[in-house]
């Protein structure tokens, strides 16, 4: 499964953002391993092995449902996020469009 992550990430998020998203996803494996260790240490005595199995099963089912319902066809609009972060980017974008229109008219 992890051997497919780079390809799937690039297909879903594109070349522009896919490598960053893959980095976050890969780092999440380490975070999950460390947090899972603490979770087992604190909860296994009270829940037992069966309880821990059911919790992991529920988390896996929720992740599976989220993956099945995600719309992979819809592309993320990076430009709107960029403009929301930087209000001056809207002005620059409008100037670039005006320059492009002027170039096309010439």
Image: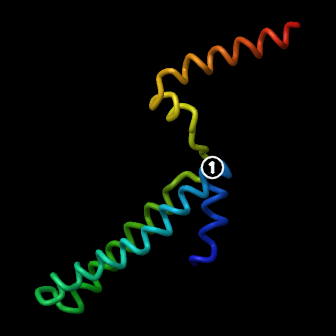
User: In the depicted view, which residue is nearer to us: 105 or 75?
Assistant: 105
Corner quadrant of residue 19: bottom right
What colour scheme governs how the chains and residues are painted in the rendered image of this protein? Answer: rainbow
Tell me: residue 75, above or below residue 13: above
Residue drawn 69% across and 18% down? 96
Residue drawn 51% across and 28% down? 83
Tell me: residue 48, above or below residue 15: below
Where's residue 31, x and y in %?
A: 36, 71
Q: Give the quarter of the figure containing the N terminus.
A: bottom right
Tell me: residue 49, above or below residue 66: below
Going by the picture, which residue comes out furthest to the left? 46
For label 1, the residue is 73
Tell me: residue 49, above or below residue 98: below
Count of labels in the image: 1
Q: Is residue 86 left or right of residue 51?
A: right
Q: Callout 1: 10 Å neighbours few (<14), some, many (20+)?
A: few
Corner quadrant of residue 102: top right
Residue drawn 53% across and 63% down? 23
Going by the picture, which residue comes out furthest to the right? 106
Where's residue 57, x and y in %?
A: 34, 79
Where's residue 51, x and y in %?
A: 21, 85
Corner quadrant of residue 61: bottom left
Instruction: Determine the secondary structure under disc 1.
Output: loop
Q: Give the quarter of the figure containing the C terminus.
A: top right
Where's residue 75, x and y in %?
A: 61, 44
Residue drawn 62% across and 77% down? 3
Q: Is residue 82 left or right of residue 7?
A: left
């Amino acid at each position: 499964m992890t051997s497919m992550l780079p390809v799937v990430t690039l297909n879903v998020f594109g070349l522009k953002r896919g490598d960053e998203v893959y980095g976050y996803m890969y780092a999440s494996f380490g975070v999950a391993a460390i947090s899972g260790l603490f979770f087992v240490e604190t909860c296994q005595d009270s829940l037992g092995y069966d309880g821990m199995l059911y919790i992991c099963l529920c988390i896996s089912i929720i992740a599976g449902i989220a993956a099945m319902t995600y719309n992979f066809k819809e592309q993320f609009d990076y430009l709107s996020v960029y403009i929301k972060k930087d209000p001056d980017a809207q002005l620059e974008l409008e100037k670039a469009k005006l320059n492009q229109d002027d170039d096309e008219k010439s």
